[in-house]
Image (cartoon, rainbow, N blue to C red):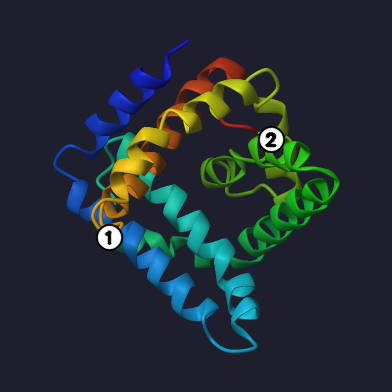
């Protein structure tokens, strides 16, 4: 299996010549959700309503980038074409991770890892419901949660550097991490489904 270093290298290859778009799309998603979330009293409602389709569009952009499909910044809004399923997916992930986190931090982390591939799965399989995407992610991550956790830990040094100066480095770290997650998903998909898409 590819190491964390190899997955990060694959991410850098997909971002080569596309760093501007990657930074722009990641920043735009953060601005949209940040501005909406900052609305007094009702910001959390706006985040809940927009979080799903924006997240799906963000994951779709970096998955297409990994596949050399030349996505445009407009791909960020493709999730609104599947608003219902993406909204429910966002809501269910939030609820499940929150409930497990109420027990202890570790179960919450495990739940987040378990459902980490759900947006990629939904992008690859438009006909899936939110619960089906979650179940497929859960199946795919059996035996691989530790590998993804180690991959996340490998960014700690980058996160520290990104904070200097004034956190500006996060503009590049965010797309780097998303591109690496896309590389992880592609490898995981090939190992768990023979490279095919999931059907119900």
Distance of label 2 from label 1 (alpha carbons): 33 Å
Q: Is residue 163 above or below residue 29?
A: above
- 96 lies left or right of 61: right
Q: Residue furthest top?
A: 1
- Quarter of the image that includes the C terminus: top right
Residue 136 image position (x, y, % from top left): 69, 34
Secondary structure of the residue carrying tag 2 is helix
Task: Give the x, y percent position of residue 77.
Answer: 42, 66
Determine which residue is flagged by label 2.
114
Q: Nearer the viewer, residue 27 or 183?
A: 27
Give how far across and how far down residue 180 sits, in percent.
39, 34
What residue sits right under mark 1 in the picture?
Answer: 166
Point out residue 104 in the picture as x, y percentages from the top left corner.
Answer: 80, 43
Which of labels 2 and 1 is toward the front?
1
95 lies above or below 37: above
Direction right: furthest residue: 103
Judge the density around disc 2: few (<14), some (14-19), many (≥20) Cα neighbours within 10 Å: many
Element class at badge 1: loop
Sequence-first disc among 2 and 1: 2
**Is residue 63 shown to the viewer in this render?**
no
């Amino acid at each position: 299996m590819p190491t964390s270093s190899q997955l990060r290298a694959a991410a850098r290859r997909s971002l080569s010549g596309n760093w501007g778009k990657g930074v722009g799309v990641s920043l735009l998603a953060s601005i949209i959700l940040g501005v909406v979330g900052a609305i007094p009293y009702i910001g959390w409602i706006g985040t809940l309503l927009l979080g799903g389709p924006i997240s799906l569009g963000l994951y779709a952009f970096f998955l297409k980038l990994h596949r050399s499909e030349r996505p445009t910044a407009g791909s960020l809004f493709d999730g609104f074409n599947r608003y219902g399923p993406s909204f429910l997916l966002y809501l269910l992930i939030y609820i499940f991770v929150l409930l497990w986190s109420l027990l202890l931090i570790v179960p919450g982390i495990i739940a987040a890892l378990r459902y980490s591939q759900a947006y990629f799965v939904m992008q690859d399989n438009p006909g899936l419901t939110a619960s089906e995407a979650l179940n497929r992610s859960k199946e795919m991550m059996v035996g691989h949660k530790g590998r993804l956790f180690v991959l996340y830990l490998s960014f700690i040094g980058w996160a520290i550097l990104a904070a200097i100066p004034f956190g500006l480095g996060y503009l590049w770290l965010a797309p780097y991490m998303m591109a690496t997650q896309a590389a992880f998903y592609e490898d995981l998909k090939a190992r768990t489904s023979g490279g095919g898409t999931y059907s119900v």
